[in-house]
Image (spheres, grey):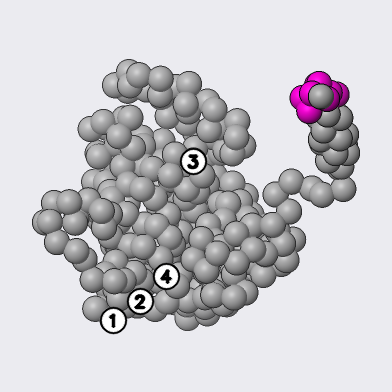
Amino acid sequence: MNNPFSNKKERVGSVLSLLNRGRKKTEQRTDVPENLFIQCPKCHSSTEKQILSKNLYICERCGYHFPIRAKTRLRMLYDNGEFTELNENLVGNDPISFPDYMDKFAKVQKKTGMQEAVKTAVGHIGGVRTVAGVLDNRFLMGSMGVAVGEKITRAAEYAKQNRLPLVIYSTSGGARMQEGIYSLMQMAKTAAAIKNHSEAGLLYISVMTNPTTGGVTASFASLGDIILAEPGALIGFAGPRVIEQTIRQKLPDGFQSSENLLQNGFLDAIVQRRDQKDVIADLLRLHSK
């Protein structure tokens, strides 16, 4: 009687050979670039990265506003995308010797190409010379440490000294815990700088994007003469999970959304990204002397 398992090794070898041959063909394919498509976190649809870029990183299907880089936003905001960066090389240190902070900080710098979580600049918006600051949530969630607070403060002081309006785009997880009490001190420092700018009779426009939370919300982001926001932005002090864990209650849907805050008088307007430059330029011209 023939043994049905006598040529088992040959059969298995043939199958593996076919699988490996198919795998090699797949590995050799180089015609499909990586990260060609980006998935929307709201409606889960996929959009080609190039198309999304042309649409100012707004989902065509649901209108979700993707986070964008600080430098990209500055180019969108300033006339002809031209501006001069202020205090470009100002960086913080490790004031409380937080474990592994400097290693993580260096990795984020390399990954983002930024020195810190905010860029400040001066240029023209709608023909009006203006100082602007933009936080970038790729850099430690746009958290506010000593250097971020210092750059915001210096931007406000520069605007005051040169009699210029100020625009700040916020996106942040709050104060930077790795810098302890020194990060919390930036709330008072930035608020004082904004107050001095205001007392000089100068305009400050604050634009809140997704998310704007913690110490940033509790300081300069909420002190604008005019406060704008992007659609669907999460805005608040503590995040919804923290609040729910504290009060042991479920928050209403959209409790901290920009739409809800507009209805309750916290914001002056919600402005689509594609309209922001025109709206801000009109406001600047209206308030310029």
Going from N to C along the chain, the mark reached first, 3 or 4, is 3
Mark 2 nearby-residue class (10 Å; few <14, some 14–19, many ≥20): many
Q: Are marks 2 and 4 in contact (CB under 8 Å)?
A: yes
Q: 179 or 159: nearer the eye? A: 179
**Taken as a whole, is the magenta stretch helix, strand or loop?**
loop
Residue 79 relative to residue 225: left or right: right
Q: Which residue is mark 1?
A: 263
Q: CA distance from mark 3 to mark 2?
A: 26 Å
Most foreground residue, 84 or 53: 53
Dots 2, 1 in contact, CB < 8 A: yes
Q: Amino acid at mark 3?
A: Phe
Mark 4: amino acid: Gly
* Region of the chain picked out in magenta, as a range: 2-10
CB under 8 Å between callouts 3 and 2? no
Nearer-N-terminus badge (3/2): 3
Q: Which residue is mark 2?
A: 259
On screen, residue 22 versus residue 81, left or right, reads right
Whether tag 1 and tag 4 are in contact, CB under 8 A, the answer is no
Examine the structure image and report whether residue 7 is included in the region drawn in magenta. Answer: yes
Q: SS for tag 3?
A: loop
Disc 3: which residue: 139
Q: Position of residue 288 (x, y in %)?
A: 48, 74
Secondary structure of the residue carrying tag 1 is helix
Quarter assignment of residue 154: top left
Magenta region includes residue 161: no
Tell me which label, 1 or 4, sits earlier in the chain: 4
Say which mark, if any, is on residue 232: 4
| Measured Cα–Cα span from mark 3 to mark 4 | 22 Å
Q: Nearer the viewer, residue 110 or 216?
A: 110
Q: Could you say where residue 7 lies in the image, as x and y percent from the top left? A: 84, 23
